[in-house]
């Protein structure tokens, strides 16, 4: 299936774009985009096997969302599934508005047969992100799609406008229905190895991207899979990296790129080869066996189909670490605002707190569980953010996950860590296992200041990049290694910190960071939305503004 350029993809599913002086004071004076989505089950055949998939307006993957910095996005989601459903917006920061985050710690599920309208503003953001279903292992059935946030017209972008802008949603895939996978996890077992890799919901050679010789194209690559890091490459073509999860990067050139679960990259490729068709290759990394899938890069005047061996990818961990360290912020480029990205000198700010997070795996009551600092998360009967807003006791306790590893046996709890608004913190992810991990933080971007093998110590700070580290929302941690980040806590709310290894997230490897200020001010955080769904102990509460 040929893809088309972004100029032709401004979505037909956008019902309207209007300028409003006032709909909600939180979002006043910025453009509005309205979407109406119906979520259903339907037959899909990603790897040639019929299975039950989650469709949005009949599409798998779901529709692309296009927006411009500061746009307000209203998405009316009709849940036509026979069970509750939620969508979350990976990388969208939901400034002052964690109620819209779409994970169970912040938002009540949409009941079957009902609808809910998300009200999202992409405040001070640009870049490549994605949405996905966050409940009940629905992510293994689809329901995901891309989010593109473009720069405002007067904000300079550090590269010429490409001839087209293509989305590539890549990920490992199971031919078993998501309900079967969920049952395996609920019974306390690990998932088997995936069956294959999909590219935009299709298997090998089922997706074609058409290019014209001599022109340059933008590829937005997102790993929407459940577990595996993937290597992305285009036969006989170099890729120039230009953006990572909202940050314009130094424009390094790569022959292949490791994309870990939950991560998004933008690259430019130029159709500068002889006119024929070329392989786009995606393969697993750091896995017991290699899975490979391909798409086609088709030159518009080509009469020659793809040929030759499928180009191989890297095999060493050190290669990937060195590539990760080479990805840096373009300090002179504008971000969502006209001022250069390097204007904020994160390396000169004193750290007020260090948090060290260790993952672990163990059996609890003879069932497989995963934890952070020995605490394996279990959801409460009420979204944590609603319990916090309404002052409902008995739902969670701040401090139920420690700042540092406790060395205790794994135990279950609704784990919430407290943090002060406007603090500047350091988080160290320590990985003692033989797998690559991927960690995401909702509501924020953070600076990836360092990564290395072994165990982190305070002396590890000597190797930090305190000048041009990349700012992003999802980072990898290599086997038996550590990754350190700096983060400015400038967004009040209840924010999910989770493993992007989806079975681990489902079985407890996550917690919530409560960024808190005692001052109740609309300047710092919005009130609960007047259309918020209420469930659990919040049912019957009033959403009217005080």
Image (tube, rainbow, N blue to C red):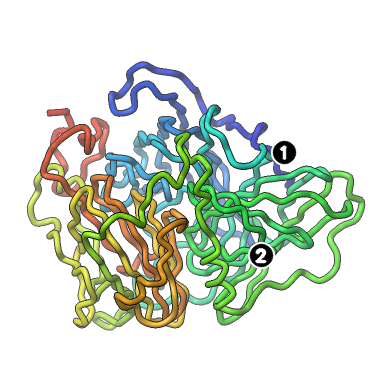
Residue 25, x across and y down, in percent: 28, 24
The number of numbered discs placed on residues in the rendered structure image is 2
The relative height of residue 268 versus residue 18 in the rendered view (above or below) is below
The one of 56 and 231 positioned closer to us in this rendering: 231
Residue 514, x across and y down, in percent: 21, 53
**Label placed on residue 431:** none
Give the residue displayed 75% in from the left and 69% down from the top. Answer: 311
The one of 131 and 311 positioned closer to us in this rendering: 311
Give the residue displayed 24% in from the left and 50% down from the top. Answer: 494
Identify the mark nearer the N-term, 2 or 1.
Answer: 1
- Give the image quarter of residue 545: top left
Residue at the farthest right position: 303
Describe the element under mark 1 as helix, strand or loop.
loop
Residue 427, x across and y down, in percent: 31, 65
Describe the element under mark 2 as helix, strand or loop.
strand
Q: Which residue is mark 2?
A: 256
Q: Which residue is mark 1?
A: 163
Query: Is 91 displayed left or right of 395 in the figure?
Result: right
**Does residue 417 appear anywhere in the picture?**
yes
Q: Residues within 10 Å of mark 2 (few under 14, many from 20)?
A: many
Give the spatial CA distance, label 2 vs label 1: 22 Å
The one of 101 and 256 positioned closer to us in this rendering: 256
Residue at the farthest top position: 21
**Does residue 173 appear anywhere in the picture?**
no
Q: Residues within 10 Å of mark 1 (few under 14, many from 20)?
A: some
Give the residue displayed 24% in from the left and 56% down from the top. Answer: 513
The one of 379 and 359 positioned closer to us in this rendering: 359
- Give the image quarter of residue 375: bottom left
């Amino acid at each position: 299936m040929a893809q088309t350029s972004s100029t032709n993809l401004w979505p037909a599913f956008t019902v309207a774009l209007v300028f409003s002086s006032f709909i909600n004071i939180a979002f006043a004076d910025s453009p509005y985009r309205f979407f109406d989505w119906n979520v259903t089950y339907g037959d899909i055949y990603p790897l040639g096997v019929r299975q039950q998939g989650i469709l949005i307006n009949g599409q798998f993957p779901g529709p692309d969302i296009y927006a411009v910095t500061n746009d307000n996005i209203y998405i009316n989601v009709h849940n036509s599934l026979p069970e509750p459903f939620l969508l979350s917006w990976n990388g969208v920061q939901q400034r002052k508005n964690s109620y819209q985050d779409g994970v169970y710690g912040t938002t009540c599920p949409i009941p079957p047969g009902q609808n809910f309208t998300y009200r999202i503003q992409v405040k001070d953001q640009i870049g490549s992100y994605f949405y996905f279903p966050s409940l009940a292992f629905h992510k293994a059935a689809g329901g995901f799609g891309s989010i593109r946030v473009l720069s405002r017209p007067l904000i300079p972008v550090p590269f010429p406008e490409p001839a087209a802008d293509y989305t590539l949603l890549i990920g490992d895939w199971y031919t078993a229905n998501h309900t079967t996978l969920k049952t395996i996890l609920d019974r306390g077992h690990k998932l088997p190895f995936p069956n294959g890799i999909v590219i935009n919901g299709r298997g090998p050679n089922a997706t074609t991207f058409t290019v014209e010789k001599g022109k340059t194209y933008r590829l937005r690559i997102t790993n929407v899979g459940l577990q595996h890091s993937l290597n992305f490459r285009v036969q006989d073509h170099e890729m120039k990296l230009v953006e990572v999860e909202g940050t314009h990067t130094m424009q390094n050139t790569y022959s292949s790129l490791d994309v870990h679960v939950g991560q998004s990259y933008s690259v430019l490729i130029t159709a500068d080869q002889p006119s024929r068709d070329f392989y786009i290759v995606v393969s697993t990394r750091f896995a017991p066996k290699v899975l490979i899938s391909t798409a086609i890069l088709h030159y518009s005047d080509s009469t020659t189909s793809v040929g030759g061996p499928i180009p191989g990818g890297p095999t060493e961990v050190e290669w990937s670490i060195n590539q990760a360290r080479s990805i840096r912020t373009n300090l002179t480029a504008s971000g969502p605002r006209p001022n250069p990205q390097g204007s904020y000198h994160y390396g000169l700010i004193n750290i007020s707190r260090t948090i060290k997070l260790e993952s672990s795996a163990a059996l609890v009551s003879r069932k497989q569980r995963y934890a952070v600092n020995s605490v394996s998360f279990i959801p409460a009967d009420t979204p944590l953010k609603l319990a916090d807003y309404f002052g409902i006791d008995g739902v969670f306790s701040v401090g139920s996950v420690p700042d540092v590893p406790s060395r205790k046996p794994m135990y279950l709890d609704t784990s919430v860590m407290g943090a002060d608004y406007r603090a500047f913190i350091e988080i160290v992810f320590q990985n003692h296992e033989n797998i690559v991990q991927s960690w995401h933080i909702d509501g924020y971007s953070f600076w990836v200041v360092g990564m290395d093998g072994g165990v982190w110590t305070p002396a590890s700070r000597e190797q930090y990049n305190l000048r041009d580290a990349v700012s992003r929302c999802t980072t990898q941690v290599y086997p038996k290694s550590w990754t350190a980040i700096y983060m400015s806590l400038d967004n009040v709310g209840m924010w999910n910190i989770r493993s992007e290894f989806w079975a681990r997230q489902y079985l407890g490897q996550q917690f919530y960071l409560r960024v808190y200020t005692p001052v109740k001010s609309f300047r710092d955080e919005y009130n609960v939305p007047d259309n918020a769904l209420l469930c659990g102990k919040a049912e019957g509460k009033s959403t009217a503004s005080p």
